[in-house]
Structure formats: structure tokens, C-alpha cells
Image: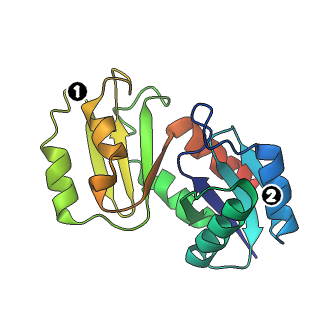
């Protein structure tokens, strides 16, 4: 059984779509997933499962909807896929603040039109690199006013996406390896 990382999209933002991490761990453990651990309150789960990632995504979405009463998109990466995403780190030489360095995990590889649309954004000092099913983005002035960050969060990307900062990404790998 493989260690896998599940990234829940759009939960625990404000008072809506609340998913308590302790209850989530219980639900997933009761559903037969092993060594379920969570990181922070933003929907980061590390677990052991014999399911392939795409099947695990669907199962987790069903389990979360049944327990919490709303739909949540879930993206899964294996431990090795997450390690590979960290290894690729295309902006590590310029991204000097891990809280402002984001990895946008995607449900599939984006088409060339996505790169064109992102290139058209007036990104100022922000930078991005598309690599496989991840988009790495560096926001030296922060995320709040970043047009690039807004474009990356937009559903018009054509794929499901959820972002985590570099600190969280590396902590997830450490948790998977623990």
C-alpha cells in the first residue's frame, strides 16, 4: 500500500465549507485508509491506500460529501509524485520566501492555451513555470494583490487546481516519509 497525499480544494475558508481535521481523520480511517494524518486546517491529508490516485480521488470526494454534506474536489499525488514535484523546483533560485512560493497542483496537464492566458496576465514581478501537472508561481510582493495568483485560482484554467505554499509542500513530503 502506497503513501498518498490528498489535497482538498476550497475548504475551511471563512465560516463556510468547514471540515474539522480531527473528524476528517476519523472518517477516512473508518473508511479503511491507513495511517491518516492531516497538516494544517486547509485540507492536506497524508494516508496509506491501495487505491490508484484517480480512484482514491473519487472515493475521498464521495466520503467527504457523505460526511460533511457538500462537494469537495480532491487532488491526489503519490509520495513519489510529490517528491518529484519538489525535485523539479524550477523557481527555487529566485523564490527566497517559501510563503510566497506556490505550487498549484492540477488535475491534468494544462493545454497550451493556459500558458498563453497566463502569459497575457500583467504579472509584474511575479513569475510562473508550468511543469507537468503543476504550475509553480513566485509572488515576491505577496498573493493578495497578485493578478497572477488570481488567474491561477480561476476555474477557467480548464482543470481543477489547488495551491499550496512551498513550506506546506515540503512538510507534506516529510509527513509522508515519517
Left/right placement of residue 14 relative to residue 96 reads: right
The kind of secondary structure element at disc 1 is: loop
Report which residue position mark 2 lands on.
Answer: 36
Q: Residue at x 59, y 40 (%)?
A: 168
Please rate how many residues cluster around mark 2, counting C-alpha atoms within 10 Å: few if below 14, some from 14 to 19, many from 20. Answer: many
Disc 1 crowd rating (10 Å Cα; few below 14, some 14-19, many 20+) is few
x, y percentage for residue 87? 48, 54
Q: Can the viewer see residue 11 in this picture?
A: yes
Left or right, 120 with reference to 73:
left
Which residue is located at x 25 percent, y 32 percent?
147
Q: Earlier in the sequence, mark 1 or mark 2?
A: 2
* Residue at numbered disc 1: 125
Colour scheme of the picture:
rainbow
Q: Which mark is residue 85?
A: none
In the image: residue 14, left or right of residue 18: left
Closer to the camera in the image, 112 or 69: 69
Q: CA distance from mark 1 to mark 2?
A: 39 Å
Q: Is residue 99 left or right of residue 158?
A: right
Residue at screen point 64% across, 51% down:
173
Q: Give the quadrant of residue 42.
A: top right
Above or below residue 77? Residue 136 is above
**Nearer the observer, 61 or 110:** 61
Which residue is rendered at x = 18% and y = 63% of the image?
112
Q: Position of residue 55 (x, y in %)?
A: 60, 78
Q: Quadrant of residue 54?
A: bottom right
- Considering depth in this image, is 91 or 14 the residue closer to the camera? 14
147 and 64: which one is in front? 64
Q: Quadrant of the N terminus?
A: bottom right
The image shows residue 78, relative to residue 139, as above or below, that is below
Picture coordinates of residue 123 (x, y %)? 20, 32
Amino acid at each position: 500500500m502506497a503513501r498518498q497525499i490528498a489535497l482538498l480544494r476550497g475548504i475551511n475558508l471563512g465560516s463556510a465549507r468547514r471540515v474539522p481535521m480531527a473528524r476528517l481523520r476519523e472518517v477516512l480511517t473508518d473508511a479503511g485508509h491507513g495511517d491518516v494524518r492531516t497538516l494544517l486546517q486547509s485540507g492536506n491529508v497524508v494516508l496509506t491506500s491501495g487505491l490508484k490516485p484517480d480512484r482514491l480521488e473519487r472515493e475521498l470526494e464521495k466520503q467527504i460529501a457523505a460526511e460533511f454534506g457538500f462537494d469537495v474536489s480532491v487532488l491526489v499525488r503519490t509520495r513519489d509524485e510529490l517528491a518529484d514535484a519538489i525535485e523539479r523546483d524550477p523557481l527555487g533560485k529566485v523564490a527566497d520566501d517559501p510563503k510566497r512560493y506556490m505550487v498549484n497542483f492540477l488535475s491534468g496537464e494544462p493545454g497550451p492555451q493556459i500558458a498563453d492566458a497566463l502569459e497575457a496576465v500583467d504579472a509584474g514581478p511575479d513569475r510562473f513555470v508550468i511543469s507537468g501537472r503543476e504550475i509553480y508561481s513566485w509572488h515576491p510582493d505577496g498573493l493578495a494583490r497578485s493578478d497572477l495568483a488570481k488567474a491561477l485560482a480561476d476555474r477557467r484554467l480548464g482543470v481543477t487546481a489547488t495551491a499550496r505554499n512551498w513550506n506546506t509542500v515540503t512538510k507534506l513530503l516529510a509527513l509522508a516519509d515519517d
